[in-house]
């Protein structure tokens, strides 16, 4: 994350909160991207890529509390999705599951007040 924030400070105007995008979860292995929304016209380089989230339907749940309890919030969201008969979409083996860090811990010291949105792309 420090690398991305440093790059943004030099090359692009950040327009929203930092996020993790979990693009693949296979057994105990995960792949993820670290990013933030940027102003139009930003250009990537050999290390940082500029992209767009895929269109479609998404579900969002908001968690307020410390990051070490986010796993429980994820499990609650997955349970709710199953009860609603909703399923995440995978395109080319990739998912879109974002943790959007609404609260900056450098600005809010109390972890009980940290707000994180969980955003999951749904199948049609």
Image: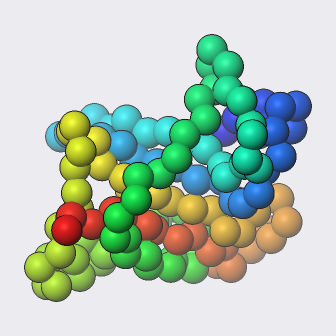
Q: Assign the N terminus to one quadrant of the image.
A: top right
The quadrant where residue 30 appears: top left
Q: Residue at horizontal 68%, vertical 79%?
A: 113
Instruction: Residue 44 in the image: state x and y as whole percent.
Output: 67, 27
Quadrant of the rendered image containing residue 87: bottom left
* Percent of width and height locating residue 2: 73, 36
Where does the image place residue 67, in percent across and percent down from the top left?
55, 62
Please tell me whether residue 43 is drawn above or below residue 117 in the rendered image. above
Between 108 and 1, the one lying in front of the other is 1
Residue at figure coordinates x 52%, y 47% from the top left: 52
Tell me, yes or no, if residue 6 can be seen here.
no
Q: Is residue 15 left or right of residue 45?
A: right
Residue 28 shown left or right of residue 36 in the figure:
left
Viewer can see residue 77: yes
> Does residue 20 appear left or right of residue 40 in this picture?
left
- Image quarter in which the C terminus is found: bottom left
Q: Position of residue 70 (x, y in %)?
A: 45, 66
In the image, is residue 108 above or below residue 33? below
Q: Which of the pair 12/33 is nearer the observer?
A: 12
């Amino acid at each position: 994350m420090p690398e991305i924030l440093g790059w943004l400070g030099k090359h692009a105007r950040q327009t929203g909160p930092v996020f993790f995008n979990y693009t693949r979860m296979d057994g105990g292995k995960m792949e993820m991207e670290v990013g933030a929304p940027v102003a139009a016209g930003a250009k990537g380089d050999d290390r940082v890529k500029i992209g767009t989230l895929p269109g479609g339907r998404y579900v969002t749940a908001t968690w307020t509390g410390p990051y070490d309890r986010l796993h429980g919030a994820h499990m609650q969201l997955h349970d709710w999705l199953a009860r609603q008969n909703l399923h995440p979409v995978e395109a080319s083996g990739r998912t879109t599951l974002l943790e959007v860090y609404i609260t900056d811990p450098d600005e809010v010291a109390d972890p009980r007040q940290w707000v994180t949105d969980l955003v999951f792309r749904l199948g049609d």
